[in-house]
Image: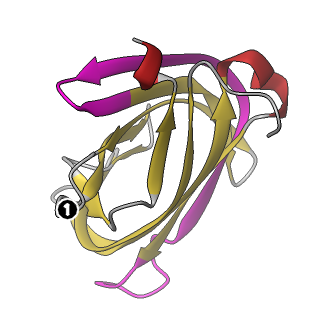
Amino acid sequence: MGVMCPCGVTVNAFSESNNVKFVGQTGTVKGNLTYLADVCITTLAASTLSLQFQDTETPNENNFTFTANDITSVVCKREGQNCVVTVTGTGLVNGVQFPFEAVFRDQVASAAKDNVQSFVITGFFDQNGAAPVAQGSIVALGCQSL
């Protein structure tokens, strides 16, 4: 990205065995989540974000890929030494458009796992709580200057 991003996040993360919720289904479904993002507030049109869910409880039953097609907001907030980046907009699952909000937490401590605090695809999917991911797989940009 050559130019320093004043607020954004890069994500290449995987979290397994999460109990997630689907709108219209009772209870939760266990599966793996893969997150990819390259988001900067100054280049929203060129920013990318996706979430892939692999159902491990009922294989292939609820698999989906969500791809953002319009990222409308990026907010960076410092929490102690850590950085929380909230990304909102709309995206597609199987050609159907849904609003979304994703909250990524970059933990500074090398022993602490980063986490996806929440990922909600309104009217379709809720990650249902924080998903821990490997340290370094979420890199928040811009909290240093806050």
Quadrant location, the C terminus = top left
Q: Position of residue 32 (x, y in %)?
A: 38, 74
The answer, for residue 133, to whether it is visible in the render is yes
Q: Residue at x 54, y 53 (%)?
A: 11
Frontmost residue, 16 versus 54: 16
Q: Quadrant of residue 120?
A: top left
Snapshot quadrant of residue 78: top left
Q: Locate residue 96, reporting x and y percent.
A: 69, 41
The x and y percentages for residue 91 are 66, 37
Residue at 33% over, 63% down: 135
Q: Which residue is mark 1?
A: 28
21 up-or-down from 92: above or below: below
Nearer to the camera, 6 or 34:
6
| Quadrant of the image containing the N terminus | top right
Left or right, 94 with respect to 46, comes to: left
In the image, 98 versus 133, the foreground residue is 133
Query: Callout 1: few (<14), some (14-19), or many (20+) C-alpha neighbours within 10 Å?
Result: some
Q: Magenta span covers which residues? A: 55-84
